[in-house]
Amino acid sequence: MSVSDADSITKAAAGAAASGDAGGKATRVVTSSMLGMGMPDKARWSERVTAVLGLNPGVFAGPGTNTFVVGKGRRRLLLDAGQGAGGYDDLLELALKQDCDGAELDRIVITHAHPDHIGGVEQVRARFGALAVEKMPLERNDLGIEVKKLGHGAVVETEGATLEAIWTPGHAGDHLCFFMREDRTLFSGDMVLGAGTTVIPPDGDLDDYLASLRRLLELDAERIFPAHGPVIEDPQRKISEYLAHRALRDEQILEGLRAGLTRTDGLVRRIYVDVPEFLYGAAGVSVEAHLRRMVKLGRVRHEDTQWVLV
């Protein structure tokens, strides 16, 4: 699927969703949710990949962080290390024995430096030895140990699998996705989730995130293995829905501003009528990511605690 084809899907999806809006109530492009979702503690996702759940369920993590044992040989790599939850190291060892032919780990590769992805590095190294760690560096050393630096286009190889690193900032400045060449599978980290949508935190950037989504479209991946939620079998449609979701949220926010709402909480209550109130905090983070982008585009200005149309 070309980017232009995807843009057509994005516009059509956004238009269809907007046309269903009635009485000021929000409608959605992405309708799935990880609330209440369960996932197996471990499972073979392909002949080269075994998923091991981080045992860290939560509002943002859903069933927990998917970590992946990747490769087909005696020594394999671990992609992301979870949060360091109790019992994760036992589960990982069990997965290596039962699902990976008794393989051993030879390194840890990290998608980005959020706690539910790097928090388990120390736990894994304590259990399986002083494994090398590879990730895109930040200005600070976020692990306190020597890290092999990965950048855009870097190739990470293990027996039976070749991963190409793709820099995808937006959710996090150091975020890397990994494209497995052998079966055109994309490890998407937090860029694309198996259900629901990604939060853009205050130190993230929505412009960068949208550009990263379009970069992923160009890969024409056959499947996505996300860091949260189940396998995505139609990557191009899913990514296009993500773009459409953001376009629709832009329109809903602008409509709210035109209606005289000037505070984040008021916009959240207008737009997110279909989510429980305990998620309003996360919704506010997303709304403000859109508003910061609109400030950069010159469409909105921020005055104290108020957002005002230009």
Image: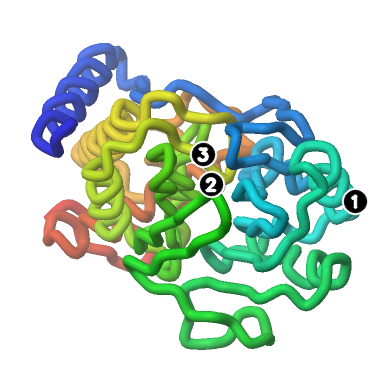
Q: Nearer the viewer, mark 3 or mark 2?
A: 3
Mark 1 residue crowding within 10 angstroms, few (<14) / some (14–19) / many (20+): few
**What's the CA distance linking mark 1 and mark 3?**
23 Å
Task: Identify the residue shown where x is 76% and y is 36%.
Answer: 42
Up the image or down, 110 lies above or below 230; here it is: below
Using the rendered image of the protein, determine whether residue 260 is visible from the camera's viewpoint: no
| Residue at the disc numbered 1 | 90
Q: Is residue 244 left or right of residue 101?
A: left
Residue 285, x across and y down, in percent: 46, 52
The N terminus lies in quadrant: top left
Amino acid under disc 1: Asp
Give the structural element (helix, strand or loop) at label 2.
helix
Amino acid under disc 2: Ala
The C terminus lies in quadrant: bottom left
Q: Is residue 240 left or right of residue 71?
A: left
Up the image or down, 185 lies above or below 307; here it is: above
Q: Is residue 202 left or right of residue 251?
A: right
Examine the image and state in which quarter residue 107 appears.
bottom right
If you read the primary sequence from the N terminus, does the residue marked by circle 1 or circle 3 appear first? Answer: 1
Labelled disc at residue 286? none
| Residue at the disc numbered 3 | 225
Amino acid under disc 3: Phe
**What's the CA distance linking mark 2 and mark 1?**
32 Å
Between residues 274 and 218, which one lies in front from this camera angle? 218
Up the image or down, 81 lies above or below 1; here it is: below
Task: Tell me whether circle 3 and circle 2 mark residues in contact (CB < 8 Å).
Answer: no
Task: Identify the residue shown where x is 45% and y is 31%.
Answer: 272
If you read the primary sequence from the N terminus, does the residue marked by circle 2 or circle 1 appear first? Answer: 1
| Residue at the disc numbered 2 | 282
Mark 3 residue crowding within 10 angstroms, few (<14) / some (14–19) / many (20+): many
Q: Is residue 305 left or right of residue 65?
A: left
Residue 297, x across and y down, in percent: 14, 59
